[in-house]
Amino acid sequence: MDRRAFLKATGAGAATLGIAACKETASKAGIGTTKADQGPGAMEMRTNPNSGDRVSILGYGCMRWQMKKDENGQDIVDQDSVNELVDYAIAHGVNYFDTSPVYLQGQSEEATAKALLRHPREKYLIATKMSNFQGHSAEASLRMYHRSFEIFQTDRMDYYLLHSLSGEADFKRRFLDNGMIDFLVKEREAGRIRNLGFSFHGPVTGFDYMVSLHEQYHWDFVQIQMNYVDWNHASGRNVNASYLYDELQKRGIPVVIMEPLLGGRLSAVPDPVAVRLKEREPARSIASWAFRFCGTYPGVLTALSGMTYMEHLTDNCDTYCHFQPLGEEDLALLEEMAQMIRDFPLVDCTACNYCMPCPYGIDIPGIFLSYNKAVNAGLVAESAQQSDFKKLKRRYLALYDQSVETIRQADHCINCGTCQSHCPQHIRIPRELARIDSYVEKLKRETL
């Protein structure tokens, strides 16, 4: 197959044409690219046509701060770590910080605010959300809204989101029937909200409905799940990011990206994928491919990354401070890698922790992460008749026990279904836990 035929077959040719078309759309909408400072080592910046904000292409997702135990054994945010990370991020041009009242069991906003308030207000943009999943009455929603202002000690929210919408019924229940959407629009008119948008997880019909409201409410930005796997190979009820992106670009709506690494899975890809990417760019990290993919699309305002550790932050800053968009051959390679990744039997968990806490103490994201790591590393046995079965058995069980406490493993799931409705990836969580538990038991009994 020649190069042109391959590009056509993989869809990369279409992706490249889409980038060209969207460059024209982005230009019309006023979206531009600049550097935070002059020189090749400055953070890539994008201009929001609705507000004129210069936004760092790398955004900080504040739902994965490091945790530690307090004197009572409770999980709390490690504030010293947060401060260090925020200081480094701001010093390297990152200015978009995304949080929510419900992240980290309600601790994210306060931890983020404590770190940011140590810096001049003009150095950062606050993005937070109305996360009224449980209490969506007008009173409860208003309390959540005003509480965010109190925590950040500010008179304006730079970016405010209707959090994790799935479609018409969800929007009406949480924002229309209780009057919240009218209230938020008035708050934008008053200048207390500078940009109003929503984040989306759901089926295509739900997305089409939300975008159809643009003429009425004028969405200043929309947050979608986008990465090189979900571009053409979204799983479950999720919608291909190529469709979401194109529909937003038709309307000139800037895009904020969540899950550019698909919950970290695109930084720890299956070994055959890692080999191919390293052959192409030996000096670059595996994760940098995913971030360059996002930055290649001109309608992207910022790509959020939940950078828990300093090595994550420094690598991502390096990618976007020395940013090089992907070309046709790079996009073709990533499309091929996306197909390979989808061929592996992974659980589509992004470790967002929306399913937590489990009422029975099960570490749901930890179990799925451990299993996915084993699959990527080739540690999952297929049959007890394999010559290396004993070795694979020992290594998998050791990894499982190291990653997840025994009392929090999959065998403790009672199939109550509490977690199911909270999963934005629409994973059938009890079924997947049962599958992993069955695999573990067969390993132990050597009955595969």
Image: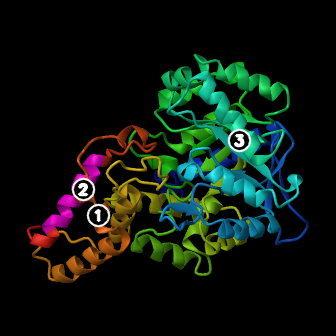
Query: Which of the marked residues, 2 or 1, is nearer the chain's N terminus?
Result: 1
Q: Position of residue 350 (x, y in %)?
A: 47, 54
The quadrant of the rendering that contains the C terminus is bottom left
Whether residue 175 is visible here, answered yes or no, is: yes
Residue 275 locus on image (x, y percent): 46, 77
Residue at 34 percent across and 40 percent down: it is 418
Q: What whole-number distance in Å separates the C-alpha atoms at marks 2 and 1?
A: 7 Å
Judging by the rendered image, the residue that carries numbered circle 1 is 407
Q: Residue at x 50, y 62 (%)?
A: 264
Location of residue 186 (image quadrant): top right
Residues at circles 2 and 3 in contact by the CB criterion of under 8 Å = no
Residue range of the region highlighted in magenta in the rendering: 430-442
Residue at image mark 2: 412
Local secondary structure at mark 3: helix
| Residue drawn 75% across the image and 24% down it | 185
Q: Nearer the viewer, residue 336 or 405?
A: 405
What residue is shown with label 3? 148
Distance, label 1 to label 3, CA atoms, is: 36 Å
Horizontally, is 405 left or right of 142 in the view?
left
